[in-house]
Amino acid sequence: RFVVRAFADDRGARVLAGLRALSAAGIRVTPPLGYHADRRALVCDWLEGECLADRIDRDDAGDAIERTARLLARTREVSLPANVFAAPRTAADIHREAASVLADLGDVAAGDVADAARELAAALPDPRVDRAPRRSVPQHGDLHHRQVLVEEGDVSLLDWDELTLADPHEDVANFVAHLDLLVLERRLAPERAARFERRFVDASGLDAAAVAELVAPQLAKLALVPFRNLRGDWETETRAILERSLERAVRPAVRCSR
């Protein structure tokens, strides 16, 4: 079996080049088979295993979460083709994307949701202010618990459609933001989420404070998900996401024991 990913542009060729570089470096990724330029279709081999999301549901995900973080650390050391990945994404770009989502919410929401969006926008760093960029490294670009496959004591990362060079804390912050989302959806207890977060950030080898800076905007970028999914109570869900993002922005660092 194999997987075919269709693209609206030539991004699939870039993803193929990146996957080949990662695979050659020993990173466990979706094995690339080829790219059809005319159809803009990327073909990858099929992987067997258990989704990390299922292990999180059973509360036996701690070891797999740590292995995922260590795999990300190795991924950051891989050299991707510079001519293919020439425009890295920075932390400022993440803040700009979050600001855009909050502005969109102002167009579709009212009352408490609009107020929460404005309050969060004021609490996040001004995306118009240039910040000193960190080094750019390979990043999955959309990493969360459903993109990790656990197999025979190891892990693989799936769906590299957003593979890019970016701030080294982006993937880890996005993973943590999705843990917050699971808590808000009542699919994960807060204390378990905090424990998973600590193990993940510790194993990533990154500075916890630097990761925490990006969790709030990464979570804010998810605020339109309930609306886009046409959920009946989307305003309540969106407000909860915005309020949690604000908590992260004001007090970003998590402190808990294993």
Image (cartoon, grey):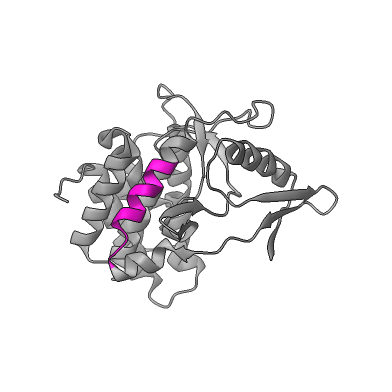
Image quarter of the N terminus: bottom right
Left or right of 151: which side holds 186?
Answer: left
- Magenta residues span 59-71
Q: Is residue 116 visible?
A: no
Q: Is residue 75 visible?
A: yes
The location of residue 238, given as percent across then percent down, is 36, 63
Q: Is residue 75 magenta?
A: no
Q: Is residue 68 magenta?
A: yes
Q: Quick one: which residue is furthest to the left in this view?
A: 257
Our reading of the magenta stretch's main secondary structure is helix
What residue appears at the point 40 percent right and 48 percent down from the top-left corner?
68
The location of residue 98, given as percent across then percent down, is 43, 46
Q: Image quarter for residue 181?
A: bottom left
What residue appears at the point 45 percent right and 40 percent down from the top-left corner?
94
Q: Quick one: which residue is furthest to the bottom in this view?
A: 232
The location of residue 129, given as percent across then percent down, is 41, 27
Left or right of 65: which side holds 1?
Answer: right
Q: Quick one: which residue is furthest to the top in this view?
A: 132
What residue appears at the point 45 percent right and 64 percent down from the top-left corner?
51
Q: Image quarter for residue 116?
A: bottom left
Q: Is residue 212 above or below residue 236?
A: above
Left or right of 22: which side holds 238?
Answer: left
The location of residue 208, given as percent across then percent down, is 26, 37
